[in-house]
Image (tube, rainbow, N blue to C red):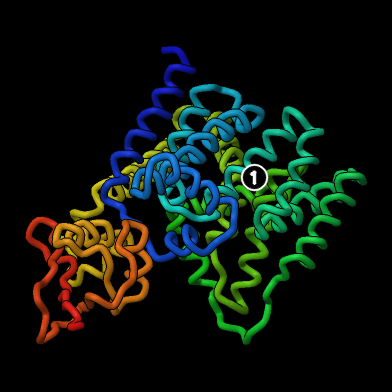
């Protein structure tokens, strides 16, 4: 079968699955803050989308899906020098699409998806159009503060390979980013190292994370070490060092570790194919177990609402913060209520996205009110996910 056709099939199937999930995901409080209060590039992207399609779940998430699809295309192109067989690159793309962290950035409005796209774009330009990569480095300084970690990795690479112009440029951009945005290393040691490793294991899946770690360790001992190695390893090691002192936001550093995937796949296939077929069993078993775990995780995401049946408290669900708001807004609008005063101020901001503004005519409270005129209940089949009283405030 034609490789390009297979690749397009992968992309189309991935996009359709992501779009299929959108109706079940309402805006979270973090996403509502980005939409209403931020001035970042991701804010303007979703604002443009909602201006075209209206304030709804599809318009909120379609920019992230587009960025995800573009990132997949870039990764496929970037991987060519490392994974020369085209079918191997398709496996790489399949693994990438199934990663828990990638599914999250493809659906959730957050800077991580944007950062990952631009890091992959930078590496693509380095491989194909080097002059434009310098312009992109300067441009990225004004997009997000986390690109200082990209500058740090590029600086280490340029220093080792004696690329003086690139070293001076990337180091200067790194220092300027520190002066412009700052970097918080204050506070007493908190010992978040194991928690940080745990979060990384969730983002990448445990087996793949361990193999990424092994790949970077192996590359550190061997030469040559290219930009992918330095970008991934420097951000990863910095996050581990900081975790000894403070709680870090892994979502800031994870996009940089993602770019090590071509190195990991290259290392895996090299280790597999230098061995005789009868000695390849453990590699096949490792691959099958890893892939099955990724598929299981993806299924749990796409069928996430059924997990409510396994929980005593619905709020323990990993996606609970992405439920309720849109359905609640529809139920309030069905009652003729277009504005309300919610006890939960996070819910207040989320409802605003769906057209429920703030006013003091009605009170929304999850605690039962004596003077409540009615109750709003949200169910998933026979499970109560949310229940609140709506009280009309006397004039």
Q: Could you tell me how many numbered marks the image carries?
A: 1
Question: Can the viewer see residue 122?
Answer: yes
Q: Position of residue 26 (x, y in %)?
A: 31, 55
Q: Residue at x 62, y 51 (%)?
A: 256
Question: Can the viewer see residue 282?
Answer: no
Q: Position of residue 270 (x, y in %)?
A: 59, 33
189 or 371: nearer the eye? 371
In the picture, measured across the screen, residue 348 lies left or right of residue 133, that is left
**Which corner quadrant holds the C terminus?**
bottom left
| Helix, strand or loop at mark 1 | helix
70 or 231: nearer the eye? 70
**Residue at mark 1:** 119
Q: Position of residue 149 (x, y in %)?
A: 70, 57
* Residue 28 to residue 76: above or below: below
Quadrant in which residue 393 is drawn: bottom left
Quadrant in which residue 2 is drawn: top left
Q: Position of residue 231 (x, y in %)?
A: 69, 50
In the picture, measured across the screen, residue 371 lies left or right of residue 64, that is left
Residue furthest left as drawn: 382
* Residue 227 to residue 27: above or below: above
Q: Residue at x 42, y 20 (%)?
A: 6
């Amino acid at each position: 079968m034609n490789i390009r056709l297979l690749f397009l099939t992968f992309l189309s199937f991935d996009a359709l699955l992501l779009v299929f999930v959108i109706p079940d995901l309402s805006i979270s409080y973090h996403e509502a803050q980005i939409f209403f209060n931020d001035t970042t590039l991701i804010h303007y992207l979703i604002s443009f989308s909602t201006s075209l399609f209206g304030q709804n779940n599809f318009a909120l998430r379609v920019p992230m899906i587009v960025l995800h699809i573009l990132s997949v295309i870039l990764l496929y192109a970037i991987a060519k020098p490392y994974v020369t067989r085209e079918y191997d690159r398709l496996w790489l793309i399949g693994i990438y699409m199934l990663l828990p962290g990638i599914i999250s950035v493809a659906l959730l409005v957050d800077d991580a998806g944007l950062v990952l796209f631009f890091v992959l774009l930078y590496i693509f330009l380095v491989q194909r159009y080097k002059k434009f990569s310098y312009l992109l480095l300067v441009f990225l300084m004004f997009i997000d503060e986390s690109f200082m970690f990209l500058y740090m990795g590029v600086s280490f690479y340029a220093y080792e390979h004696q690329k003086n112009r690139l070293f001076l440029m990337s180091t200067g951009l790194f220092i300027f980013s520190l002066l412009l945005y700052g970097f918080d290393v204050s506070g007493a040691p908190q010992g978040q190292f194991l928690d940080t490793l745990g979060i990384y294991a969730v983002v990448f899946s445990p087996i793949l994370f361990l193999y990424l770690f092994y790949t970077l360790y192996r590359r550190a001992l061997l030469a040559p070490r290219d930009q992918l190695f330095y970008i991934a390893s420097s951000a990863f090691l910095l996050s581990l060092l900081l975790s000894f002192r403070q709680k870090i936001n892994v979502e800031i550093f994870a996009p940089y570790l993602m770019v090590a995937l071509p190195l990991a796949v290259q290392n895996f296939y090299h280790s597999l194919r230098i061995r005789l077929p009868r000695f390849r069993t453990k590699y096949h078993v490792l691959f099958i177990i890893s892939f099955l775990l990724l598929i299981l995780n993806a299924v749990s995401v796409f069928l996430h609402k059924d997990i409510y049946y396994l929980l005593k408290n619905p709020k323990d669900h990993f996606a609970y913060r992405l439920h309720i708001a849109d359905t609640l807004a529809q139920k309030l609008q069905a009652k003729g209520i277009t504005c309300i005063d919610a006890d939960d101020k996070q819910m207040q901001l989320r409802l605003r996205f769906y057209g429920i503004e703030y006013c003091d005519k009605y009170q929304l409270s999850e605690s039962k009110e004596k003077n409540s005129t009615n109750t709003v209940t949200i169910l998933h089949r026979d499970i109560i996910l949310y229940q609140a009283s709506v009280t009309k405030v006397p004039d």
